[in-house]
Image (cartoon, rainbow, N blue to C red):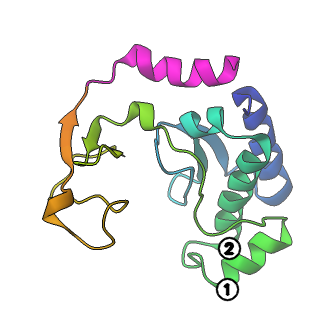
Amino acid sequence: MADLARVTVWADALIRLHLNPAEWSFAFDNAKKRAGLCDYGKKRITMSRYLAARWEDDEVHQTLLHEVAHAMAGVGAGHGPAWRSVAASIGYVGDRTHTGETAVELAPWVGTCPAGHVHYRHRKPTRALSCAKCSRSFSRAHLISWQRREISAAARRAAVADRQAG
């Protein structure tokens, strides 16, 4: 699991190497599913403290490279050819989105299908959803029943601390 202090050092080093550190900065954010973000308006690269705390160093480093490549390629590049070229040139080898573990223990919505498969959502489901493990297409027979759970501030702190200690 990545040490958050070390992640900050890596991010600052990448910013110094590839961007103007007088303009760009790094911070952690509270995202539970999204790994990183390049905020062009604030000229800030952010990374989820929850995901950084649970991922291995290489996955964290690749996420930082991904976001720095966005900053270098510019606001209009998206995940297109210009961004891919810049990303490859600085050592990014991943895809356009992460496939790593998310912070499911912090998801306030927990759903269960009739077969017992558990699903997590960080936002309130706005429509009926069925279990994709039970049926490839929407099926009323496999509807997910959602329950809201409270996530305390202590649980949020523990989600980072437990990963750092483990």
The residue located at (45%, 23%) in the rendering is 156
Over which residues does the magenta segment extend? 150-166
Residue 118 place in picture, x, y as percent: 34, 43
Q: Residues within 10 Å of mark 1 (few under 14, many from 20)?
A: few
Q: Is residue 143 left or right of residue 89?
A: left
- Secondary structure beneath dot 1 equals helix
Can you name the residue that lies furthest to the top here?
154
Q: Work out whether 91 lies above or below 25.
A: below
Left or right relative to 44: residue 117: left
Q: Nearer the viewer, residue 101 or 37?
A: 101
Tell me the residue at 67%/22% (across/down).
164
In percent of width and height, residue 2 lies at 73, 33
Quarter where residue 51 is shown: top right
**Horizontal side of residue 103 vs 84, given as left or right:** left
* Residue type for callout 2: Ala
Q: Is residue 1 magenta?
A: no
Residue 71 x, y percent position in the rendering: 65, 64
Residue at which label 1 appears = 81
What is the CA distance from the residue labelled 2 to the residue labelled 1?
Answer: 10 Å
Compared to residue 59, the image places residue 153 above or below, namely above
Residue 130 lies in quadrant: bottom left
Q: Which residue is mark 2?
A: 73
Tell me what residue is drawn at x 52 percent, y 24 percent.
159
